[in-house]
Image: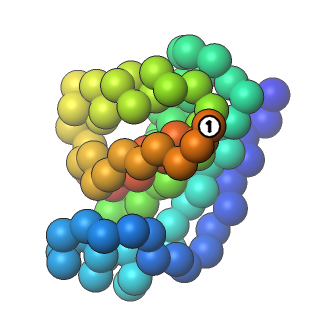
Amino acid sequence: MSLVFQVGRFLIGKSSEENSEKMMNDDIITLDARNLLCPMPVIRVQEAVASLSSGTIIKAVCTDPGVLYDIPAWVRVHGHKLITTEENGSEYTVIIEVCG
């Protein structure tokens, strides 16, 4: 299964001024991890991070509710920055910043 990325500018819901400003000024990589079950969304994020530079923002869109816990835990362990998590019906979004 191949990785699906989409690069584009967008502004998401309310967050801190720093995060909102960062998101308005940078391209965001959208990772489509819908219809994947644990641990695949985390693995897809890990694969994406490996090919991206520090400061890049990744928006992972998933349908597995476990990502609201699994991806933030992976981010913390690997030294990246969790920007926000969101739940919208049956879709779950996790936005992170690649660090290091």
Crowd class of label 1 (few under 14; some 14 to 19; many from 20; radius 10 Å): few
Quadrant housing residue 74: top left
**Which color scheme is applied?**
rainbow
5, above or below 34, in the image: below
50, above or below 37, in the image: below
Examine the rendering and report whether any part of residue 74 can be seen.
Answer: no
Q: Secondary structure at mark 1?
A: loop
**Quarter the N terminus occupies:** top right
Residue type for callout 1: Ser
15, above or below 10, in the image: above
Q: Is residue 86 left or right of residue 79?
A: right
**How far across and down, in percent of the image, does residue 79 sit?**
21, 37
Write the residue at 50% across / 53% down: 59
**How far across and down, in percent of the image, does residue 54 sit?**
33, 58
- The residue under label 1 is 90
Write the residue at 44% across / 69% down: 12
Residue farthest to the front? 89
Q: Is residue 28 left or right of residue 57?
A: right
Q: Is residue 83 left or right of residue 8?
A: left
Examine the rendering and report whether any part of residue 7 can be seen.
Answer: yes
Write the residue at 31% across / 33% down: 72
